[in-house]
Amino acid sequence: MSDSTRTYLDFERPIAELDAKIEELESVLSRNGEDAPDAADEIAKLRQKSSDQLKSMYSKLDAWRKTMVARHPERPHLRDYISSLVTDFEELAGDRRFGEDHAIVGGLGRLNGRPVVIMGHEKGHDTQTRLKHNFGMARPEGYRKAIRLMDLAERFDLPVVTLVDTAGAYPGIGAEERGQAEAIARSTERCLTLGTPMVSVVTGEGGSGGAVALASSNTVMMLEHSIYSVISPEGCASILWRDGARARDAALAMKVSAQDLIELKIIDTIIEEPLGGAHRDRADTIRRVGDAVETALASLDGLSPAELRQRRRDRFLTIGRSLLET
């Protein structure tokens, strides 16, 4: 059966029209059964046409359309990954200085039997939870909680897994008063000095320092249609052209896609998404991310704290050097 509750992006309108026809024919078939012999054949043809169009459309997405896909409300979020991949999860709260920040969720658990500290940005899935999690935009206490979790990981020799999905750190007055920039810098520094393996996956948006603070890892991966950038396309357009409507131009110029960033050696691996994006098959997407994380952690097994720190340091210091040499 077609999913009538699915959210379609603007550029997916042709697919939406086909799926609407499929749904209508399925309704006719369910009502009339044997009296509609041609309906099943027509549904099969329309399904194939929809699949072909979807494959063609998603094989040539530009950076702006990838931005739209990365922000799709039905993409799996942090709690979806944790509930599917992590057993014995014990969430830890608070930064022990100011309070709890729900935009960053983290704790201890087992990933495929391996004890880990896992944390990341949670955007929420409906109005109530989005407000609770502040749309994944963390305040200083969220990043200080992340530092606390990394300290804990190092104390007990546990690898750290982070899932990044944020438009950026929260820019409100209260956050600035409590030292937002300092908290982001300290969290980034703690990632770089961590003496245990650290793997990060950008699962949706990787926005600005709010993302880097959790993604300065030994291995940085991105889902195929996620984005990672120093600023949002809208923010860039507002600064450069004083016109947020030129966000598409900014996205194309900024090279925010996984395909651009792997060429620049800013990320290490692209995790392929199911046909039509992660939101069309959440379970398969989560499985693929889990497999990629497990492979990345296995590649870091046996390295000493000094080797892990040096590899992480070398990884980030070499970004951009090949461009300067050319």
Image (cartoon, grey):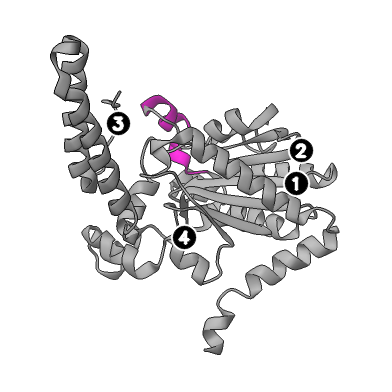
Per the rendered image, the range of residues in magenta is: 127-138
Query: Is residue 115 located in the magenta-colored stretch of the structure?
Result: no
Figure quadrant of residue 266: bottom right
Residue 254 screen position, x and y as percent: 38, 68
Does the CB distance between marks 1 and 2 fall below 8 Å? Answer: yes
Callout 4 environment at 10 Å: few (<14), some (14 to 19), or many (20+)? many
Q: Secondary structure at mark 2?
A: strand
State the CA–CA distance, disc 3 to disc 2.
35 Å
Q: Which amino acid lies under the numbered mark 2 shown in the image of this protein?
A: Arg
Residue in front for this viewpoint, 119 or 260: 260
Residue highlighted by disc 4? 258
Q: Going from the N terminus, do you reach mark 1 or mark 2 first?
A: 2
Q: Residue at x 48, y 58 (%)?
A: 208
Is 234 located above or below residue 108 in the figure?
below
Q: Going from the N terminus, do you reach mark 4 or mark 2 first?
A: 2
User: Disc 4 vs disc 1: which is toward the camera?
Assistant: 4
Q: Main SS of the magenta segment?
A: helix
Q: Residue at x 66, y 52 (%)?
A: 199
Q: Quadrant of the N terminus?
A: top left
Whether residue 6 appears in this view of the structure is yes
Residue highlighted by disc 1? 159
Is 27 located above or below residue 224 in the figure?
above
Residue highlighted by disc 3? 6
State the CA–CA distance, disc 4 to disc 2.
28 Å
Residue highlighted by disc 2? 114
